[in-house]
Amino acid sequence: MYKKYYNIIFIFDICLNKTSLKNSNMTFGKRIKKLRESKGIYLREVGAALELDNAFISKVENEGRLLPRKHLGKLAEFLNVPKDELLVLWLSDKIKSIIEDKEIGKKALNKVLKDFEK
């Protein structure tokens, strides 16, 4: 349970630019593309591993779509990275896609952080 809250707080810290992380300025799509390319894996291999169309994986990597959450575990295993690493980036992108007004979004995230500290 604490791990779940830690991940959520970590994500909010990244969104509020309070946490410095090697990949904090990297989106989910950019990170998986970088991992895939560094391992010499073709786009079609990722698509096959996840049973998804290559065009869809390309859209995910180029930030046009967000990968469904149910595929994160399989993707992490395929790329040999911790699932939490991908989950943090995925949730961060998801939160940013929901927040339309940056200032109101910051206020909402600050409220959630305060609620978690109780």
Image (cartoon, rainbow, N blue to C red):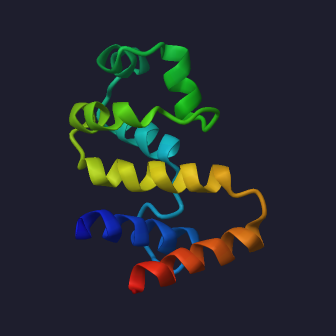
The percent position of residue 37, horizontal first and vertical second, equals 39, 34
Res 101 quadrant in image:
bottom right
Q: In this view, does 28 lie above or below 39?
A: below
Q: Which residue is drawn at 58% across and 80% down?
A: 110
Q: In which quarter of the image is the C terminus?
A: bottom left
Q: Nearer the viewer, residue 1 or 86?
A: 1
Res. 17 visible in picture: no
Q: Residue at x 51, y 56 (%)?
A: 92
Q: Which of 106 and 53 is in front in this view?
A: 106
Q: Is residue 93 above or below residue 34?
A: below
Q: In this view, does 31 lie above or below 101?
A: above
The percent position of residue 90, horizontal first and vertical second, equals 46, 48
Res. 94 visible in picture: yes
Apparent side of residue 8 relative to residue 25 in the rendered image (left or right): left
Apparent side of residue 18 relative to residue 76 in the rendered image (left or right): right
The percent position of residue 98, horizontal first and vertical second, equals 66, 52
